[in-house]
Amino acid sequence: MSKLSIGIVGLPNVGKSTLFNALLGRQVADNSNYPFCTIEPNVGIVEVPDGKLPVLGKIAKSKRIVPAVVEFVDIAGLVKGAAEGEGLGNKFLNNIHECDAICHVVRNFSDPNVARAGSTDPDGDFEVVCAELIIKDLESIDRYIDSNKKKTEEKDKYELALKLKSELEKGVLARRIELNENEKKLVKEFFLLTSKAFFVVINVDEDTYKNVDDKKWNLGDWEVVLVCAKLEVELADFSKGERGKYLKGLGLKKSGMERVIGRAYETLGLQSFYTAGEKESRAWTTKISSKAPEAAGVIHSDFERGFIAAAVISYTDFIEHKGWLGAKEMGKLRLEGKEYVMKADDVVEFRFNV
């Protein structure tokens, strides 16, 4: 698939830019303590944490290791009334359109030195932002309805628009509206903000962060990731060993950044596969249930068009049998065709006609 883009969204001063800086491991976004310190969206490419890739590269004796990446976009804080132009208004709602998914950041830290700028509590923060996205979606739906009242060639789409309007006016996010198979196809043509996949990050104090278990937290009936963004920025200056020890002292198995990126993959239904050789070992991203030609197209469109077959070894077999040759000798290399559904962590060599 093409580059994955996640928009970081929330009210002013909830920690979006701090989270963004933590993800990148360095100070990039201005995280000053005043509303709208982010005006133009900051964009950063973040490597996907992957402990398997270096092991793969060592066995393949690769000259370089290339991880999969995610693009994070730090979008300026929304406020109540943004859809009507309040704050920095529609400009930033439009920025969200360009992202594949949304990372909602809500505040649950108590620092009195950081102005709340409209933030009240995690549930309230989330409701305000969702309401603004719904209002923006209603604008889009109303425009379509007004311009298609007298047309008959798009009856199904028009009826869907009326259904969407009715549910959105009740405060239901578009992705939660029950749709039949035909409606699921048609709804994509509206490009609704509340149709986008999303996940929620709660930015907490360091004391709350100790021994955190994301599975025990939720926001309404939405599962969340807990992060102490301020602490994660500080951890970026630690060596890998120091970072591991510090996290262990807090009772954490993974950093907040690893959990955020993991949730982004989960939310979008993504998985990684690998290519491995002397030149490089690289992780690639594809949708779960993608077939081999689609995965080949992630590397290059010519690979998909000219696809012949895929030589596939599971990551476990590749490691156990010390690479391509050993796995092949043990009968672990499979030659798969166009209907093969890719599995997570497959090690692949595509064969194709140019």
Image (cartoon, rainbow, N blue to C red):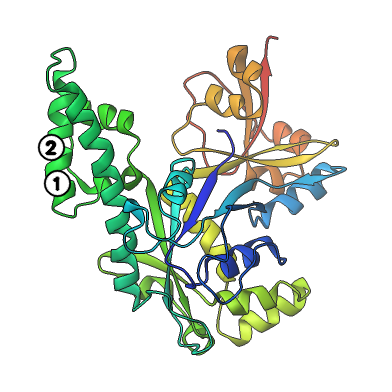
Q: Position of residue 115 (x, y in %)?
A: 48, 81
Q: Relative to 302, is 89 on the left or the right?
A: left
Please state, as top left, top right, bottom left or bottom right, where the N terminus lies in the image.
top right
Q: Nearer the viewer, residue 83 or 322?
A: 83
Image position of 119 with respect to 178: above or below: below
Q: Residue at x 60, y 15 (%)?
A: 307
Number of numbered callouts drawn: 2
Q: Give the percent coordinates (x, y) of residue 235.
A: 69, 76
Crowding near pointer 1: few (<14 within 10 Å), some, many (20+)? some
Q: Amino acid at mark 2?
A: Lys
Q: CA distance from mark 2 to mark 1?
A: 6 Å
Residue lying at 43% horizontally and 79% vertically, measured from the top left:
116
Residue under circle 2?
163
Q: Please give the label number shown on residue 134.
A: none
Secondary structure under badge 2? helix
Residue nearest the observer in this picture, 240 or 116:
116
Identify whether 339 is placed above or below 93.
above
Q: Which residue is mark 1?
A: 167
In the rendered view, does 328 fall on the left or right side of 98?
right
Quick check: marks 2 and 1 in contact, CB under 8 Å? Answer: yes
- What's the residue type where badge 1 is placed? Glu
The answer to which image quadrant residue 249 occupies is bottom right
Q: Position of residue 152 (x, y in %)?
A: 13, 14
**Residue appearing at x 32%, y 31% in the figure:** 188
Q: Position of residue 133 (x, y in %)?
A: 32, 51
